[in-house]
Amino acid sequence: MLQAIILAVVFATAAAGDSSSASSAMLETVVTTVAAVIGAAVVVGLINQQSGGGDSSPFSRSSRHKKNKSVDTSSTDTDISVEGSVMITLPSWALASWEEYFTRQYTTDEQMMTLAIHLSDRNITEGTGGPFGTAIFERHADGHATLISIGMNRVVPLGNSTLHGETVAIQLAQKKLGSFTLMMDKNEEDGLFYDESKDELDDKKSSTASPPARKRQFELFTSCEPCAMCLGATLWSGVSRIVCAATKDDAQAIGFDEGPVFEQSYEHLEKADIQVTRNVLREDAAKVLRRYGAIGVIYNR
């Protein structure tokens, strides 16, 4: 199609060399037609790009993701549009350190919390958000852990009051695993690499009586006890454990309002089978908060 258009332009240009009025009129017609065709092609290309055509991102929605049989995935409600989408991004320094973070060996709570506190501190230094960092790990049977996602407070730079460290890490973890919950069976593969040929075998297994499968253990490490919003997000996220460093009092001491969070809130998490561990490296995390309190924006006053 493009070759035909080009040939038409060439012939029309050659004809215009005769400088006759007829040739000039023909040239004008051809040029107008070419412009219209090219414009239509550009519009079609933009539409295809917007609908996800050709997206090779490893986090893009694709047929490789596990299909939830109880959910209709054919709905167009999730189609991306400029008006109907929200962008969540990590700072460039976090992406530059990606390999370093994700290839480390993690075993102890202190090692994992050190990463969460580092994220909160680096976020201040780079001016890319508030003083809160989060990391989500998968704990394996032998005790070691694999880093699944990281998050840091992005409220001010992205203009979104919901982008606290916990909510960013939870959303990125669920996107990576291709699941709306982190409460997953141990034999359930990540959505990006799900083998649909196993569906039939799974159906056969479910028809016979057998012990319930062991759940995968995802643990959320946060540099500070969650605010009311993030505590609710933790409850719904599917994590099996939450580990906190600094306390609600530490955050409120520099001016943040953490909302209605009480001891009963943590008791509710425990009743929901979410293990709670607090005050891990508290002083290290509180020091980061105090540093931010002297230079940063307390944005929810």
Image (tube, rainbow, N blue to C red):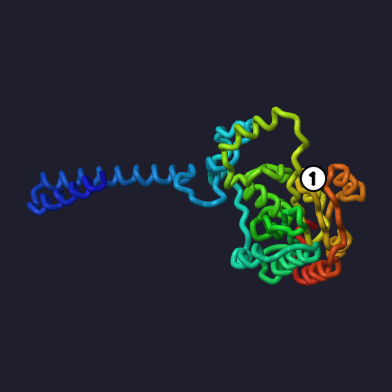
Q: Amino acid at mark 1?
A: Leu
Of the 4 image quadrants, the one containing the C terminus is bottom right
Measuring 72% from the left and 29% from the top, which residue is drawn there? Answer: 208
Q: Secondary structure at mark 1?
A: helix
Of residue 209 and residue 96, the one placed in the foreground of this image is 209
Q: Quadrant of residue 248?
A: bottom right
Which residue corresponds to mark 1? 235
Of residue 230 and residue 284, the one placed in the foreground of this image is 284
Find residue 204 and report its horizontal and vertical position in percent. Answer: 65, 30
Circle count: 1
Find residue 25 and report its horizontal and vertical position in percent. Answer: 15, 44
- In the picture, measured across the screen, residue 204 lies left or right of residue 111, that is left
Of residue 145 and residue 255, the one placed in the foreground of this image is 145
Of the 4 image quadrants, the one containing the N terminus is top left
Find residue 106 and report its horizontal and vertical position in percent. Answer: 73, 63
Q: Quadrant of residue 256?
A: bottom right
Up-down relation of residue 69 to residue 186 (above or below): above
Label 1 crowd bin: few (<14), some (14–19), many (20+), radius 10 Å: many
Find residue 153 and report its horizontal and vertical position in percent. Answer: 71, 59
